Image (spheres, rainbow, N blue to C red):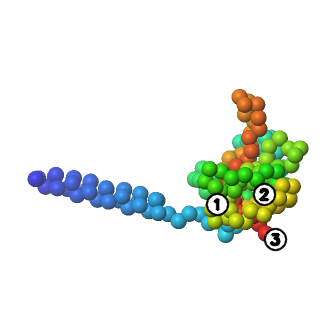
Amino acid sequence: MGKRTKIITAILGFGLLIVIGVAYYMFNMPQRDVQSAKTDFSLSSSEIVNQYLADANIANEKYLQEEGDSKILAVTGKVFAISEDLNNQKVILLKDSSEKAGVSCTFTKETNKNAENLQIGETITIKGVIRSGAGFDEDLDLYEDVIMEKCDVIRE
């Protein structure tokens, strides 16, 4: 093997080690602790839905971030529906009966227990990370809810 081949092999090996190290770090990065982090915005379920229905682009700029660490919201509203998703995580829909859309809040396995005693019609505040905004789907002719995840009830 020539000197040039050894240098190229060493550079490729070093590059491969860097790629493996970065991939390992990204895979094992700690999850964002939403509940202990500072709340970026506190508002009612009606306020955020109406902001998205008025202008989704402006609302997205305000609440969503391209890097993935979207804003943390504390949303207050009436419990309209209580369900579970396929992962057995509680999903609470905050919505006033007169509103076109609401805020769908998905809890985590760790916070599920805090949603067990909620009652339909009860006014509560839920803290979580926003994932998508409300909108109108013309094909289905229905309104889509604001989606929040990593949620928990804020007890005052």
Front position among marks 2 and 1: 1
Q: Which residue lies furthest to the left in this view?
A: 1
Real-space Cα distance between discs 2 and 1?
17 Å
The image quarter containing residue 78 is: bottom right
The image quarter containing residue 107 is: bottom right
Q: In this view, does 81 lie to the left or right of 89?
A: right
Helix, strand or loop status at disc 2: strand
Q: Please name whichever residue, 33 or 7, is drawn nearer the observer in this view of the structure.
A: 33
Residue highlighted by disc 2: 75
Neighbour tally class for label 2: few under 14, some 14-19, many 20 plus, Cα within 10 Å: many
Q: Are marks 3 and 1 in contact (CB under 8 Å)?
A: no
Residue highlighted by disc 3: 156
* Amino acid type at mark 1: Thr
Say which residue appears at 65% left-offset and 51% top-offset. 85
Real-space Cα distance between discs 2 and 3?
14 Å
Q: Is residue 132 left or right of residue 48?
A: left
